[in-house]
Image (tube, rainbow, N blue to C red):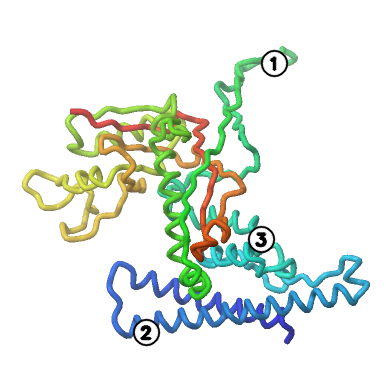
Amino acid sequence: MNHAEIANDAMEKREVAANKLRKFSTQTQNRSLTPDERKQETALLDEIAEYDTTTKRHITAAAVEDEAMRVNSPLQEMGVKRDFAATRGNVNTATAGELLSRSIQAARGVTTAATGKAFSPEEMANKFVDLLAPQSVVMTSGVNRVQTNAETYSFPVVRSDFTAGFIGELDDLPTGGFGAEPLKVTPRKIAAADMLANELVEDGGSAFMNPVAKSLMRSVSLGFDREALVGTGANKGFVGIANTPGIQTHEVKGGFKDLDAFVAAFGKLEAVNSKATAVVMHPTTWAGLMALRETSGSLKPLLSESAGSPTAGVQRSILGVPVWISSFMPNTDVLAYEADQIFAVWRKDAGFQISDQFGFLKDGTAVRAIARATIAVPNAAAVCKITLSA
């Protein structure tokens, strides 16, 4: 096997080990690990680190070999090069830590042209948004994601439909009625940064980069969520869903006593040919709804399944519509919307960026995550804000 094939084999084995670790983390989340489970986790991390070392060594060797071939072979001078990315397959399947680790390697010149575009900052930028999505309530709720290179993105908004009518043969066809205009939105910059000790960067590997990368992405995603839900456009941000002009509203006086407010809000969406597919509220608002009982003196929550017991879990949904929890929502507001009618617009250059110059005298590496995004609601009537009043 040549260096490229060995590196490819190591990457595939590393992916298998990484999948095992992800599955293991999912099964053991929200509880302490037993001694045997901790040994199992350590073994998987060591296995992944070993594959990372093997891959890095043979990628570097393949690059040297490729450079020698380019110098000695006239075919290489004519543009025939080893396509390492083609031998690898789909290398876009990566954890946040792997992408951050690769970004650091690229910034330090570890990777070369022989490693293919899959290791370039451009590819990491695309994957960055994918990895950020699970951290974001708005993105997870099912809104459309639009990727663009443009500074300003335009949506065609239909304000009125064509006029149709019954006519006789050879009569003039009815015209008019159609009205449309562009909705222009500008993605705004959201960023987080810090400095890492070079010992962590050099010795930790991608496994140790995972918490760092996740923290960076979580900060960016929370910044996006805050603006996407309740942004006013102030402080260089953008206008969020709750403050979009033209959305529908429904007022509830005295707080929730039943689910009638949701019936009314969903009905308002249905009246404009829309459908509620997501509800977003503050955690305390959800806790208040869970405290409602089926009847006075009953222990059974109103949100329980009809045949469920008061000790059974409550699915986070209302009338079949999934409920998402965000601390950025005021506890006096609830959003109900059709996710297909909302668009998250992301600039292509979102991703990790690295610099070892800023921390040269401190033996550190500066790390930053930058995204440019905004929310667009072309059909504002597809959103209904429920407001609680005294």
Q: Which of disc 2 and disc 1 is earlier in sequence?
A: 2
83 on left or right of 38: right
- In the image, what residue occupies the spot 67% across and 70% down? 89
Instruction: Find disc 3 in the rendering and name its residue.
Output: 120
* Residue 88 marker: none
Q: Which of disc 3 and disc 1 is earlier in sequence?
A: 3
Which numbered mark, 1 or 3, is in the foreground of this view? 3
| Whole-number angstrom distance, CA of label 3 to CA of label 2 | 35 Å
Question: In the rendering, at what x and y percent does residue 318 appear?
Answer: 30, 45
- The answer to which of 111 and 384 lies nearer the viewer is 111
179 on left or right of 339: right
| Whole-number angstrom distance, CA of label 1 to CA of label 3 | 56 Å
Q: Amino acid at mark 2?
A: Lys
Q: How many marks?
A: 3
- The answer to which of 167 and 64 lies nearer the viewer is 64
Identify the residue at the far right of this view: 74
- The answer to which of 34 and 378 lies nearer the viewer is 34
Instruction: Find disc 2 in the rendering and name its residue.
Output: 39
Question: In the rendering, at what x and y percent does residue 19 appear?
Answer: 49, 73
Instruction: Find disc 1 in the rendering and name its residue.
Output: 173
Mark 1 surroundings: few (<14), some (14-19) or many (≥20) residues within 10 A: few
| Whole-number angstrom distance, CA of label 1 to CA of label 2 | 77 Å
